Image: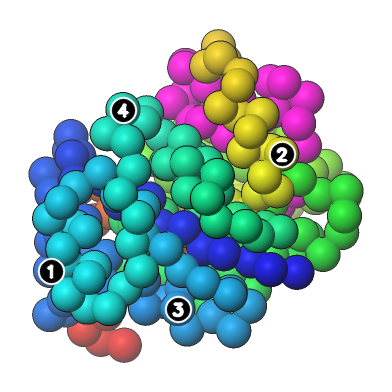
């Protein structure tokens, strides 16, 4: 199975300007993400997909493979899809550029379901820390007994009506693996109602009856969206 990782890396960001280039523990955030992906023995290649000349120049200066993509893309999935039109692979892995705590174990878990021919999309989850259960910036996921996603939400799901002690919450981690046909479908389908309400692009697949399989990993991450997130990651990397 040929697996290629694509790192969507746009320079514009609303809450934390130019976050992809912000330094964490002495190097740009993008460097942490690229190095984590490159260290996975399961990936045949790693490509940065960007709409920024500045990011492209940084990549080339460091010997990272990079591809210029359209500035019109609304999501990282659209950017991955563009690269998939010119790069052949069995599986395309979306490693988001604001995940500096990414590690090879995340990619190992992510690719595990893709060994089954019927799986079109996979992603990963981890037990949700108590402080993130009600945090709308931490996306939660619930699955069926076979690992298929039932729903993703910024709300607390499942709702523990009777305050049971045995209810477990899972946090969704923003890594995806796709067959090309799934990427093609995403770009052909219009934005879905639940996707627009939650601002979660993966809901486009579920609303259109396309299964997403979810594998568990013990390794949490922090997607960097704010200055506070960046400082938390900096502290973790400095202490590791």
- Residue 213 in the image: x percent, y percent? 75, 48
Which is in the foreground here, disc 1 or disc 2?
2
Q: Which residue is mark 1?
A: 23
- Badge 4 crowding class, 10 Å Cα cut-off, few under 14, some 14 to 19, many 20 or more, is few
Give the labeled residue for mark 4: 72
Decide: is 68 above or below 91.
above
**Relative horizontal placement of residue 212, taking residue 61 as reference (left or right):** right
Comes first in the chain, label 4 or label 2: 4
Q: Residue at x 31, y 88 (%)?
A: 240
Marks 4/3 in contact by CB < 8 Å: the verdict is: no
Residue ID at (15%, 51%): 53
The earlier-in-sequence mark between 4 and 1 is 1
Q: Secondary structure at mark 3?
A: helix
Q: Residue furthest front?
A: 86
Relative to residue 66, is residue 235 depicted above or below?
Answer: below
Q: Quadrant of residue 137?
A: top left
Q: Residue 17 magenta-drawn? A: no
Q: Which residue is mark 2?
A: 181
Q: CA distance from mark 4 to mark 1?
A: 26 Å
Please provide percent x and percent y for residue 100: 33, 67
Earlier sequence position, callout 1 versus callout 2: 1
Residue at coordinates 78% horizontally, 60% vertically from top-left? 113
Q: Considering only order in the chain, which callout, 3 or 4, is on the residue closer to the N terminus?
A: 3
Which residue in the protein does label 3 denote?
Answer: 38
- Highlighted magenta segment, given as a residue range: 194-218
Residue 215 colored magenta? yes
Mark 2: secondary structure: helix
Label 1 to label 3: alpha-carbon separation: 19 Å
């Amino acid at each position: 199975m040929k697996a290629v990782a694509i790192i969507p890396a746009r320079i514009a960001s609303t809450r934390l300007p130019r976050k992809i280039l912000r330094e964490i523990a002495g190097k740009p955030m993008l460097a942490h993400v690229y190095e984590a992906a490159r260290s996975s023995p399961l990936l045949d290649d790693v490509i940065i997909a960007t709409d920024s000349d500045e990011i492209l120049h940084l990549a080339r200066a460091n010997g990272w493979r990079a591809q210029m993509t359209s500035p019109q893309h609304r999501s990282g999935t659209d950017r991955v899809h563009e690269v998939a039109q010119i790069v052949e692979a069995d599986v395309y892995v979306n490693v988001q550029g604001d995940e500096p705590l990414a590690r090879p174990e995340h990619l190992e878990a992510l690719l595990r379901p893709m060994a089954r021919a019927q799986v079109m999309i996979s992603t990963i989850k981890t037990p949700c820390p108590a402080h993130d259960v009600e945090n709308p910036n931490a996306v939660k996921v619930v699955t069926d007994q076979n690992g298929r996603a039932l729903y993703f939400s910024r709300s607390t799901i499942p709702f523990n009506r009777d305050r049971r002690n045995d209810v477990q919450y899972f946090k969704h981690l923003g890594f995806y693996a796709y067959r090309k046909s799934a990427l093609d479908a995403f770009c052909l389908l219009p934005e879905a109602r639940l996707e627009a309400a939650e601002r979660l692009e993966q809901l486009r697949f579920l609303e259109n009856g396309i299964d997403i399989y979810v594998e568990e990993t013990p390794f949490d991450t922090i997607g960097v969206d704010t200055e506070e997130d960046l400082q938390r990651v900096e502290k973790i990397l400095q202490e590791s």
